[in-house]
Amino acid sequence: MRRPAPLSRHVEGFRQHVEEAKNLKIMQQVADRLGIGIHEVHMELEKVMRWMQPVRRQMPVVSDDGNIQTMEVTRQGIGPLNTKFGKFWEMSFEVGDRWSKYHALVMADLDSHSGLPVFKNKEEIVVRTDSGCVTGQVFADTTCDCEAQLHLAQEEISHAGEGIVVHIPHQDGRGMGLPFKLGTLQLQDALGVNTVEAARLLAYDGSIDVRTYEGVVAVLKFLGISDQTMINLVTNNPKKVDALEMNGYRVINTPAVVKGHEHISHHLAAKADGLGHNYGVFRPRISPETVNLEAVDLP
Ligand SMILES: [Zn+2]
């Protein structure tokens, strides 16, 4: 004789039934208000729920010591941002490294099933790897140029029509952490030293920039950027170029130079002297003329 299902399962089934009916009612209300079919609302809702599901992948990357390591990358959500630079998709990632949280801002069409970008230009893409800066990018402190650099990158991407910003919130203060960064702001404010001097005064062991970029490579690979694609990196920081080149990418750069007030030029000079930043094109594109000349067959 079959035993009856336990009561809890009945309750659970009934609850699910009620939830579905409620949801169906809301979907119908929305469809009626918009003058569309309930099917359309249902399809969109299904897509959104699919995009909210975590997607986990293992990505092989080359570290700055030359060793290959496998990084776990999990995409956790996708949604559109209508910015003053155009429409970007924000994708939230969890990466198995010390920085853990990553955001990708992607300008491209998305595959509606997988949520992965479909880039029209397979040859070249504009990319920025952007360290989070809560003081400048969120609270509008004018000591640094981080907010302006991020916007400049979004503008470059908008001009190209496609591209990716990988933003890493925990790389604030060149990866030294917010307490350290706030300390450097105090030293700059009180003593009038520059950002690099302030960091050197405060650092125990002389290291003032501990950022690593393997996670950025892992996120780019997740987004389908193979090493066959040339990366036009919006940066002044040669270390970021090195990290991509270590992973087999060909890289050219677009300077991320923000024209601005006295604060900023002081800041830029300090970063050039202290961190080796370069405000020109230091990974130039090989001009097509040169390539053509080499390829000409002699009669
Ligand atoms: Zn900043």
Image (cartoon, rainbow, N blue to C red):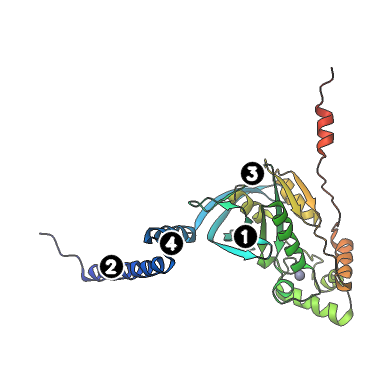
Question: Looking at the image, which is closer to me, 132 or 60?
Answer: 132
Is residue 52 visible in this depiction of the protein? yes
Contact, mark 4 vs mark 3 (Cβ under 8 Å): no
Residue 267 located left or right of residue 148:
right
Where is residue 12, by image quadrant? Answer: bottom left
Q: Which mark is residue 226?
A: 3
Q: Nearer the viewer, mark 3 or mark 1?
A: 1
- Disc 4 under 8 Å from ligand 1? The reply is no
* Residue at the disc numbered 1: 88
Q: Earlier in the sequence, mark 3 or mark 1?
A: 1
Distance between mark 1 and mark 4 Cα atoms: 20 Å
Circle 2: is it few (<14), some (14-19), or many (20+) Cα within 10 Å? few
Distance between mark 3 and mark 1 Cα atoms: 21 Å
* Residue at the disc numbered 4: 45
- Disc 2 under 8 Å from ligand 1? The reply is no
What secondary structure is found at the residue carrying circle 1?
strand
